[in-house]
Image (spheres, rainbow, N blue to C red):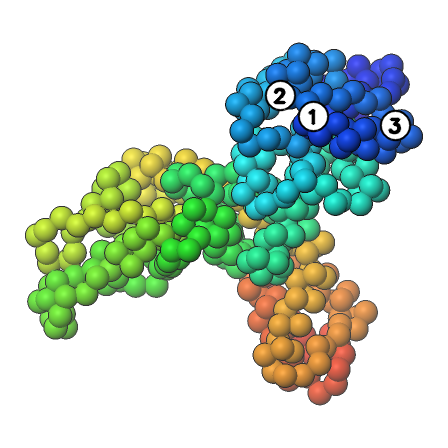
C-alpha cells in the first residue's frame, strides 16, 4: 500500500467502505448501485453532520456539498486528522472552476463532475484508496478551455502539482515565488494564478527585473515625475499603478538591486510608493508574484538579496522542474507548438518522423520549453516537406 492510513484495509483485504454524502437520495442510490459491483461497500448520508459521525469507519468520502452547509469545513478538516486521514473526492452535479478551486483549497483528493464516465470515476476512486491522484482532471480541462493553457498543462506530476497548489492559493493576496530554470514556463504559471484569482478581469502586468539598469527599473516600476531625469519631459505612471486591482509579475527578482529591494518591500507591506523624483505618497492594490531561476536563499546568504524581502515574498513557493526531468512532456508540447505554428503560417501542421522524436528525446534541453519552442519554430520555417527529420531540428549541444 502507498498510504499508511489505509494499512488496515490492505492487511485484512476487506471491502473498501465508501461514505456517500449527497442531499439527494436518488443520487446516493445510483452511486451505490455503481460502486457495489466493483467491490466497494457503500453507506449514504444526507448532511455533513451525519458524515462527521460516520466518517471514521470509512475509507473514502464521495461527496457533493451544498454551499450553504455550515458543517462542511469542519467535516473536511476532520477527515485530514491523524492517525488515519480519509481522502475526500468531490463528485458534483454543478461543477464550476470556483468549486474546483475551493475543493482543492480544502485539500480534496479530486474534483469531478457528476457526468464523469463510470469507468473514469472508478479509476479515480481506486487511485484515491491507494493514496494516489489522477490529476484533478476537471481543473485541467477548465484551464484548457477557458484560459487556453493546453500548452502548459504538463503531464509531469511535479509540474501539475505546482498548478494544483496555485489553484489553492489563487484567491488569496499572498505573494508567490515561482522557481525554476529559464524557459520552464514560470510566466505561464503566474498567468494561471492570475486567471484563477478574483483579479482575473483586471490587468496582468509583467516586468523583467534583469532587463533594465537600476534607475530605469525603478522608473518602470514606480513611475516618475517630470524632470526626474534628463529625458523625463512629462510625468509617467509606473507598472504598479498600471496593475492596480490586478497582478504584477516580477520576473528574475534576484537581479533587483538591494536599494530597489527596500522600496519593493515597502510597497509589499502597505501598497505605498513614490514616483521617481516625486514627494507625494501613492497607493496601489496589487497582488505581487515573482519568479527566479536563481537560488534566493543562497543570494540572501551572500548578501545580494535582502533577508526581510525574502521572508516577505516567500509565503508560497512553487517549483517547476526542467524539461530534461519531464520527458513525458516532449510529445504533447511539440504537438502543441507545431499546431500553433501551422495556424500562424496558414499551412497544415508538420509531423515528426520517428527518428526526429528519438532525436528530441535524446537531447538535454538546457533551454527547456523555450528551446523546444525555438527549435520547432525554426524547423517549421525552413522545412521543405511535411515531416520533420533529425536534420530539420538542428539541435545545439552547448556542451560540445
The residue wearing badge 3 is 36
The residue lying at 72 percent from left, 77 percent from top is 350
Residue under label 1, please give it.
Answer: 21
Indicate the secondary structure of the residue bearing disc 1.
strand
The one nearer the camera, 128 or 325, is 128
Comparing 318 with 284, the one in front is 284
Q: Residues within 10 Å of mark 2 (few under 14, many from 20)?
A: many
Pointers 1 and 2 in contact (C-beta within 8 Å): yes
Q: Crowdedness of circle 3 by 10 Å Cα count: few (<14), some, many (20+)?
A: some
* Dot 3 and dot 2 residues touching (CB under 8 Å): no
Q: Which residue is mark 2?
A: 48
Q: Residue furthest right?
A: 37
- Above or below for 111 versus 72: below
Location of residue 42 by image quarter? top right
Residue 317 can be seen in this image? no
Q: Nearer the viewer, residue 103 or 222?
A: 103
Q: Establish if 256 lies above or below 16.
A: below
Residue at the spot x=91%, y=30% of the render?
Answer: 37
Judge from the rendering whether residue 208 lies leftward or rightward of residue 5; answer left or right.
left
- In three-dimensional space, the C-alpha distance between marks 1 and 3, rounded to whole angstroms, equals 16 Å
Report the quarter where the N terminus lies: top right
Left or right, 41 with respect to 2, comes to: right
Amino acid at each position: 500500500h502507498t498510504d499508511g492510513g489505509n494499512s488496515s484495509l490492505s492487511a485484512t483485504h476487506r471491502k473498501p467502505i465508501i461514505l456517500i454524502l449527497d442531499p439527494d437520495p436518488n443520487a446516493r442510490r445510483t452511486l451505490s448501485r455503481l460502486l457495489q459491483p466493483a467491490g466497494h461497500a457503500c453507506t449514504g448520508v444526507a448532511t455533513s453532520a451525519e458524515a462527521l459521525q460516520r466518517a471514521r469507519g470509512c475509507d473514502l468520502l464521495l461527496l457533493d456539498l451544498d454551499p450553504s452547509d455550515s458543517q462542511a469545513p469542519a467535516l473536511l478538516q476532520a477527515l485530514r486528522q491523524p492517525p488515519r486521514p480519509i481522502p475526500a473526492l468531490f463528485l458534483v452535479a454543478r461543477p464550476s472552476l470556483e468549486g474546483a478551486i475551493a475543493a482543492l483549497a480544502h485539500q480534496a483528493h479530486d474534483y469531478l463532475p457528476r457526468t464523469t464516465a463510470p469507468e473514469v470515476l472508478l479509476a479515480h476512486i481506486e487511485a484515491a484508496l491507494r493514496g494516489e491522484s489522477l490529476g484533478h482532471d476537471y481543473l485541467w480541462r477548465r484551464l484548457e478551455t477557458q484560459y487556453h493553457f493546453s500548452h502548459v498543462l504538463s503531464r509531469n506530476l511535479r509540474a501539475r502539482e505546482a498548478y494544483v497548489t496555485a489553484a489553492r492559493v489563487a484567491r488569496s493576496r499572498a505573494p508567490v515565488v515561482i522557481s525554476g530554470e529559464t524557459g520552464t514556463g514560470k510566466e505561464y504559471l503566474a498567468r494561471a494564478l492570475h486567471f484563477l484569482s478574483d483579479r482575473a478581469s483586471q490587468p496582468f502586468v509583467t516586468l523583467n527585473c534583469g532587463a533594465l539598469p537600476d534607475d530605469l527599473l525603478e522608473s518602470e516600476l514606480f513611475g516618475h515625475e517630470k524632470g526626474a531625469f534628463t529625458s523625463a519631459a512629462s510625468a509617467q505612471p509606473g507598472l504598479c499603478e498600471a496593475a492596480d486591482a490586478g497582478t504584477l509579475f516580477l520576473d528574475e527578482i534576484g537581479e533587483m538591486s538591494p536599494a530597489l529591494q527596500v522600496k519593493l518591500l515597502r510597497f509589499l507591506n502597505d501598497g505605498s510608493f513614490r514616483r521617481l523624483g516625486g514627494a507625494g505618497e501613492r497607493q496601489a492594490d496589487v497582488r505581487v508574484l515573482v519568479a527566479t531561476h536563481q537560488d534566493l536563499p543562497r543570494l540572501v546568504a551572500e548578501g545580494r538579496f535582502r533577508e526581510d524581502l525574502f521572508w516577505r515574498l516567500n509565503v508560497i513557493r512553487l517549483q517547476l522542474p526542467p524539461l530534461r526531468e519531464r520527458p513525458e512532456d516532449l510529445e504533447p508540447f511539440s504537438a502543441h507548438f507545431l499546431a500553433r505554428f501551422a495556424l500562424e503560417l496558414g499551412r497544415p501542421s508538420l509531423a515528426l518522423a520517428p527518428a526526429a522524436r528519438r532525436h528530441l528525446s535524446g537531447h538535454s534541453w538546457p533551454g527547456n520549453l523555450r528551446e523546444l519552442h525555438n527549435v520547432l519554430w525554426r524547423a517549421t520555417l525552413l522545412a521543405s516537406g511535411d515531416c520533420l527529420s533529425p536534420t530539420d531540428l538542428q539541435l545545439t549541444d552547448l556542451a560540445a
